[in-house]
């Protein structure tokens, strides 16, 4: 994780934090924390988040279930807690400079440290804390053990090697069955497209972001096309009555009312027609 020119003060500042504040940081850096984005700071990839997402995270039910953390009841207390965390340099405020040539979509955004470190819900903050080092140590130790076990596979007992072989064959069969199912459902969909008015998908949720068992529910469903929502521009009306009133003969419009107020001239009616035509063209351009 990228840091300032001298990273030692950052580490020392993090060590001075109270246990309750460290618990808050562990929560924010965990899976229930604010959504992080990828950026580039000082030539290194970093994680950063927006201030208002951290405020919402502190107001979430997951945070309220925690113990040994400061109590947060409303948005003002959440902002005050973020201000209290900022001096310990677990995260620092960064800015996204405006570039002459914007980077392609999906690529990390360039960042730079803000000269004034303060908390603002609309600003961005970069993490200088990667979580508890215990998990990093345990993960590294597990990787070493797995690599040694793989290298020493010829020295394993015969029964253990046979069991691993059966497990690998079973895993390959499951993968092959999944691929075959995907091919069969695609062929069936193609047949229904040609022979029926509405195509049918077998296991329509197979590739959706759902649980394992939910991927096979329901067994089949019609292929419903996604409907595009049309944008409506304020000031326009789709009723036939308004259209008839505009397209009707201009001669029927009276020149004056009994009170002496003049009605809209013919030029205003023609201008209304042109404005309506321009509005319809703008809607078509937006939909394209």
Image (spheres, rainbow, N blue to C red):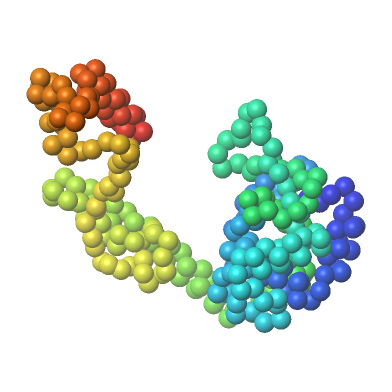
Compared with 38, 260 (above or below) is above
Compared with 266, 83 (above or below) is below
Q: Is residue 117 left or right of residue 146?
A: right
Q: Is residue 58 visible?
A: yes
Q: Is residue 158 visible?
A: no
Quadrant of res 265: top left
Quadrant in which the N terminus appears: bottom right
Q: Position of residue 251 (x, y in %)?
A: 10, 19
Compared with 23, 243 (above or below) is above
**What residue do we see at 90% from left, 57% from top?**
8
Most distant residue in the front direction: 259
Quadrant in which the C terminus appears: top left
**What residue do we see at 60% from left, 70% from top?**
74
Q: Is residue 176 left or right of residue 284?
A: right
Most distant residue in the top direction: 267
Q: Position of residue 141 (x, y in %)?
A: 75, 70
Q: Name the foreground residue: 130 vs 258.
A: 258
Quadrant of res 88: bottom right
Q: Position of residue 273 (x, y in %)?
A: 23, 24
């Amino acid at each position: 994780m990228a840091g300032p020119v001298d990273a030692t003060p950052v580490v020392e500042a993090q060590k001075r934090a109270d246990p309750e504040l460290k618990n808050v940081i562990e929560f924010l850096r965990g899976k229930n924390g604010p959504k992080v984005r990828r950026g580039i700071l000082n030539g290194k990839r970093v994680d950063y988040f927006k201030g208002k997402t951290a405020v919402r995270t502190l107001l979430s039910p997951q945070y309220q279930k925690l113990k040994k953390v400061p109590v947060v009841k409303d948005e003002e207390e959440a902002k005050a807690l973020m201000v209290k965390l900022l001096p310990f340099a677990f995260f620092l405020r960064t800015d996204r400079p405006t570039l002459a040539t914007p980077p392609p979509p999906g690529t990390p955004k360039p960042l730079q440290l803000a000269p004034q470190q303060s908390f603002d819900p609309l600003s961005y903050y970069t993490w200088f804390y990667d979580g508890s080092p215990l998990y990093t140590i345990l993960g590294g130790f597990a990787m070493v053990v797995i690599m040694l076990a793989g290298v020493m596979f010829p020295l394993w007992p015969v029964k253990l090697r046979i069991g691993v072989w059966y497990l690998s064959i079973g895993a390959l069969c499951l993968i092959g069955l999944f691929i075959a199912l995907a091919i069969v459902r695609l062929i069936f969909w193609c047949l229904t497209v040609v022979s029926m008015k509405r195509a049918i998908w077998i296991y329509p949720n197979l590739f959706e972001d759902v649980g394992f068992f939910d991927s096979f529910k329901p067994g089949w469903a019609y292929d419903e096309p996604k409907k595009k929502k049309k944008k409506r521009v304020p000031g326009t009306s789709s009723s036939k009555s308004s259209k008839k009133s505009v397209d009707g003969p201009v001669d029927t419009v009276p020149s004056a009312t009994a009170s002496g107020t003049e009605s809209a001239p013919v030029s205003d009616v023609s201008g209304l027609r042109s404005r309506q035509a321009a509005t319809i063209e703008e809607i078509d351009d937006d939909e394209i």
